[in-house]
Image (tube, rainbow, N blue to C red):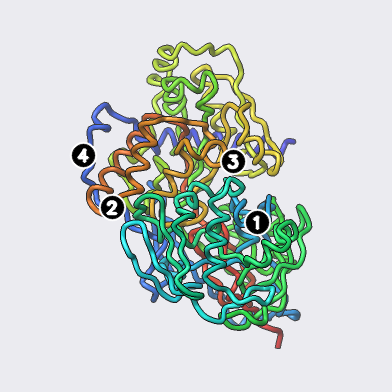
């Protein structure tokens, strides 16, 4: 108890110091008049291929990224005795084994060894052919894909165009609500089999960013035979084309796989893969340090120094498109009051909180389009923290401040830390709150319900470079409640998001996405905090791993050096 109290005090002092050093610039009345003619943000998930390291500015700190780890001292690589058994530690448990129900990164993480898509992003963030060898754009809402021949599913069936049509049709049904914000754009009646290895995919309306979404888990190609002969069994025993075959799932503990000998991409280096669930960051790091696991995903700044100082371990880091939000229930009073929501934004020093909690391992993002993403609007790059303005807006809102509001959070320690500082800052303007820490599975169910006040969430885990994912998914009203957990229903925003989807890349789409970001900022369905960095710890005998922008990582090409 004393240790936790000291931690909270340290965080509050750190946040106060950042504030006193003007870590978050006070907004002037002229800030919103800044010209929107900004250059599109670069996609830092890509590199030139010759150097895995890159840097990003975070206000007062600089993050150096190293996507492809190497041993600090190769002479200290002892190898692993059972080097055919790969063990990975992840920070959360899956809620499903069905790719069409995979609404969070934990589910994606356990499905990616099994499932594959028509295209994928490579280590440089470039779109590459995968299950499809090539494709042509027929018009603004039609694409023709040419499939690889000889690709086998885990049940021995060859993948054909009929499996693509089956998979995409299933992904557009009501059952697939968790992936609907992307997959519902597909017109199931427009899917056309040209021959066994050629398929035409059509969207309901023009969708400029469609190809960039196809590496998505919801676009996985399933075995039609497996999912039609015994769907109930397949839902719990997924059948795909990936390098690993699903074997066993133990809730809250692990998922196990064996290598797929007939994998089209070549035999995997490891015989088995086990993904363990270890929610606590420190416990996950200790499992790495003691050799219980080979790779530990989702570590925090608290483990970075230990990784850097241990020659038997390596660290891989990569910028993400993930952003964290404190969401407001826009369908429930008083959070349905836009002025009250704006007051909360002015009362919270989001930038100082990011610097205090993450200490240079993440950067503040002023909105859902993160600073290194394409079409990032940098006309108002800082948070709006202004205590006096917050008090004015609170009075204008007419909200009764005698009540106590809830801040809900899952067991993620960094979010608990953020909630603790937010609680103090809101108290400074007279807003009373209580923090409710919930078990992850219960929390995921809670945030899609209606009885909520303020609560944390993250988005952007898929790592797509196009900004559509970060604005449409969490905010379009069609995504309520599975994806749009704020329950915001705003016709103006819906129209802007729909128009942005229909446009091809160019000046018109760029300007519209800038306008969308400004509109969201003023609408304030949430306040944004960190744009996170993926931090992965590895044993120094791990080879073939590279960190990717998505929260889930790829283990498909990993090998382990054996002991001499």
User: Label 4: few (<14), some or many (≥20) within 10 Å?
Assistant: few
CA gap between label 3 and label 2 equals: 30 Å
Q: Nearer the viewer, residue 247 or 174?
A: 174
Residue position marked by numbered label 2 in the rendering: 40
| Quarter of the image with the N terminus in it | top right
Q: Name the foreground residue: 407 vs 187.
A: 187
Count neighbours of disc 1 (C-alpha within 10 A) and say few if under 14, some if 14 to 19, many if 20 or more. many
State the separation of the CA atoms marked 2 and 4.
Answer: 14 Å
Name which of mark 2 and mark 1 comes first in the sequence: 2
Distance from Cα at disc 4 to Cα at disc 1: 45 Å
Disc 3 designates what residue? 415
Q: Position of residue 545 (x, y in %)?
A: 56, 72
Residue 217, percent across and down?
Answer: 55, 58
Q: Which residue is mark 4?
A: 35
- Residue receiving disc 1: 98
Decide if residue 70 is in sight here. yes
- Badge 1 element: loop
Residue 469 image label: none
Label 1 and label 3: CA atoms lie apart by: 28 Å
Are there few (<14), some (14-19), or many (20+) residues within 10 Å of tag 3?
many
């Amino acid at each position: 108890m004393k240790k936790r109290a000291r931690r909270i005090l340290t965080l509050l002092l750190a946040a106060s110091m950042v504030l006193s050093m003007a870590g978050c610039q006070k907004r002037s009345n002229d800030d919103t008049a800044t010209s929107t003619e900004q250059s599109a943000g670069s996609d830092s998930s890509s590199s030139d291929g010759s150097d895995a390291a890159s840097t990003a500015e975070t206000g007062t700190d600089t993050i150096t990224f190293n996507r492809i780890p190497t041993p600090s001292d190769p002479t200290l690589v002892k190898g692993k005795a059972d080097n055919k058994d790969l063990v990975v530690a992840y920070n959360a448990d899956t809620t499903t084994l069905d790719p069409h129900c995979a609404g969070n990164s934990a589910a994606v993480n356990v499905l990616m060894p099994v499932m594959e898509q028509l295209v994928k992003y490579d280590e440089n963030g470039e779109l590459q052919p995968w299950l499809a060898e090539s494709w042509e754009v027929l018009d603004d809402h039609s694409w023709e894909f040419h499939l690889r021949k000889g690709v086998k599913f885990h049940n021995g069936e060859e993948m054909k165009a009929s499996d693509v049509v089956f998979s995409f049709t299933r992904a557009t049904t009501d059952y697939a609500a968790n992936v609907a914000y992307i997959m519902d754009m597909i017109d199931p009646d427009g899917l056309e089999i040209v021959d066994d290895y050629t398929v035409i995919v059509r969207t309901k309306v023009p969708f400029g960013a469609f190809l960039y979404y196809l590496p998505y888990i919801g676009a996985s190609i399933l075995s039609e035979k497996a999912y039609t002969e015994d769907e109930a069994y397949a839902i719990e025993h997924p059948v795909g084309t990936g390098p690993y075959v699903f074997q066993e799932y133990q809730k809250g503990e692990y998922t196990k796989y064996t290598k797929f000998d007939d994998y089209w991409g070549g035999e995997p280096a490891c015989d088995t893969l086990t993904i363990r669930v270890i929610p606590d960051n420190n416990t996950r790091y200790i499992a790495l340090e003691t050799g219980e696991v080979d790779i530990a995903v989702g570590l925090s700044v608290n483990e970075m120094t230990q990784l850097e100082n241990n020659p038997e371990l390596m660290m891989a880091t990569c910028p993400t498109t993930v952003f964290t939000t404190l969401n407001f229930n826009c369908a429930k009073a008083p959070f349905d009051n836009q002025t009250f929501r704006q007051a909360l934004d002015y009362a919270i020093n989001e930038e100082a909180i990011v610097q205090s909690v993450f200490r240079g391992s993440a950067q503040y993002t002023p909105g859902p389009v993160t600073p290194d993403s394409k079409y990032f609007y940098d006309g108002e790059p800082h948070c709006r923290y202004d205590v006096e303005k917050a008090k004015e807006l609170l009075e204008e809102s007419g909200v009764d401040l005698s009540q106590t509001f809830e801040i809900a959070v899952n067991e993620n320690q960094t979010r608990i830390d953020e909630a603790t500082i937010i609680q103090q800052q809101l108290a400074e303007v007279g807003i009373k709150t209580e923090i409710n820490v919930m078990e992850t599975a219960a929390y995921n169910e809670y945030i899609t319900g209606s009885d909520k006040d303020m609560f944390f969430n993250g988005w952007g885990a898929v790592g797509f470079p196009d900004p559509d994912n970060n604005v449409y998914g969490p905010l379009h009203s069609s995504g309520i409640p599975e994806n749009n957990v704020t329950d915001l229903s705003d016709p103006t925003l819906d129209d802007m998001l729909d128009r942005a989807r229909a446009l091809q890349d160019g000046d018109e789409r760029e300007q519209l996405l800038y306008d969308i970001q400004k509109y969201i900022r003023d609408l304030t369905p949430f306040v944004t905090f960190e744009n996170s960095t993926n931090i992965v710890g590895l044993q120094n005998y791990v080879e073939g791993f590279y960190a990717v922008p998505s929260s889930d990582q790829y283990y498909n090409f990993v090998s382990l050096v054996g002991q001499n």
